[in-house]
Amino acid sequence: MTDEVHSPPIAAQVERIGLSSARLRREALAPLLGTARRLITVALQLLAVSVLVFFVLRAIPADPLAMLLPPNATVEDAERMRHAFGLDRSIPEQYLIWLGHALQGDLGTSIQSRQPVIQLILTALPTTLELVFCGLVLGIFFGFVLGLVTFWWRGTALERVGEVTASFAQSIPEFLWGILLILIFGLWLNFLPFIGPIDSRMIIPSQTGFLLIDTALAGRWDAFGSRLTHLILPSFAIAMIKAPLIMRLLRSSLVEVYTEDYVNSARLRGVGEARILFHHALRNAAIPTVTLIGVQAAHTFGGTLLIEAIYSLPGLGNLMINAIRAHDLPLIQGITLTYCAIVLLLNSLVDLTYLWLNPRLRAQ
């Protein structure tokens, strides 16, 4: 009799335990499955971009070999060169050959320099990464500081001054900021260098490709300082556009967060305003700001093209400009795919960071 009474609850408990363990397994596997799906999506997007770029470049009425052929070249010379670069095949056949090599890490050979495209990209990429990193760090720093200051003194004249300053800074494009900074701090005040990545008299052995790291590893602190001073103006040109966006979004997010019940509860418990801001409100207000930072980081890679040209920095942007001038199709394709891969990976990283900061999305 007792067994009959207690057997249904025991069976129900066992069933609930089984369901709970299955749910825990699903929750544990969810991040891995999500990451796998995201990587597959990135690979498919890169494939689509490669097809689009390849066929569009071949449709442009320009001969990439015209600049390499001497004026007295014969038709046979032109055909031999076209055969050497595989340009005598059909476009679909060219793409399949290129894709097979690209899957093995070979993006082809530059028509202009006759060097492997992947080698040229890896040589130029560290300069762009250093520039983007420094520009974003400055933009995030000033954006957060101005956002907190204008929010703390909201309703005062300081908030209005901050808003006017942000609007002014955002109304000027990055390349124009680059030119203005050169005119003011480089030519007028003669305070900062603005040509090249480092003092031309300094020779630093390349170990990582990143000049800031290589100068530190070599113990050349004079060269390290020279590299930093050469980065100041282009980094500020990028930061002047990023900081106002971060400032405005952070301030508006804080205004919204301060209407939540937990902020009022903390205030009723006697928690100080500074602690409410930094320990309660800022974490939640930073969630949309982090998303914006990730989007701006991806956008910055495209924006460095003109900045690198203005400051004579040997990065991806300068490499792309030279490739376009020379109609160097393999190099243009390789740089475009590199930009696309970086943007897609940054967007994926932003999504994962957003999930980490927002527990409700993780639960879903």
Image (cartoon, grey):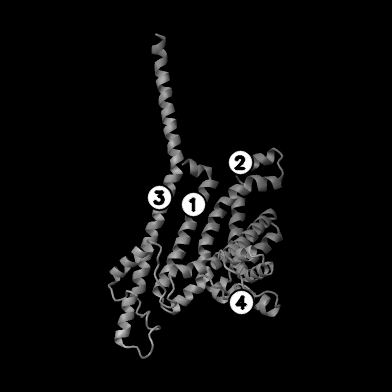
Mark 1 vs mark 3: which is more N-terminal? Answer: 3
Q: Nearer the viewer, residue 61 or 209?
A: 209
Mark 1, Cα crowd under 10 Å, few <14 / some 14-19 / many 20+, is: some
**Amino acid identity at mark 3:** Arg
Residue at the spot 45% in from the left edge and 39% down from the top edge:
27
Residue at the bottom extreme?
A: 72
Q: Is disc 2 placed on a helix, strand or loop?
A: helix
Q: Nearer the viewer, mark 1 or mark 4?
A: 4
Residue labelled with disc 3: 37
Residue labelled with disc 2: 261
Mark 2 vs mark 3: which is more N-terminal? Answer: 3
Question: On the image, which quarter does residue 225 sit in?
Answer: bottom right
Residue labelled with disc 1: 351
Asked whether the viewer can see residue 173, the reply is no
**Amino acid identity at mark 2:** Asp
x and y percent of residue 333 in the render? Answer: 40, 69
Asked whether the viewer can see residue 267, the reply is yes
Mark 1 vs mark 2: which is more N-terminal? Answer: 2
Mark 4, Cα crowd under 10 Å, few <14 / some 14-19 / many 20+, is: some
x and y percent of residue 146 in the render? Answer: 66, 59
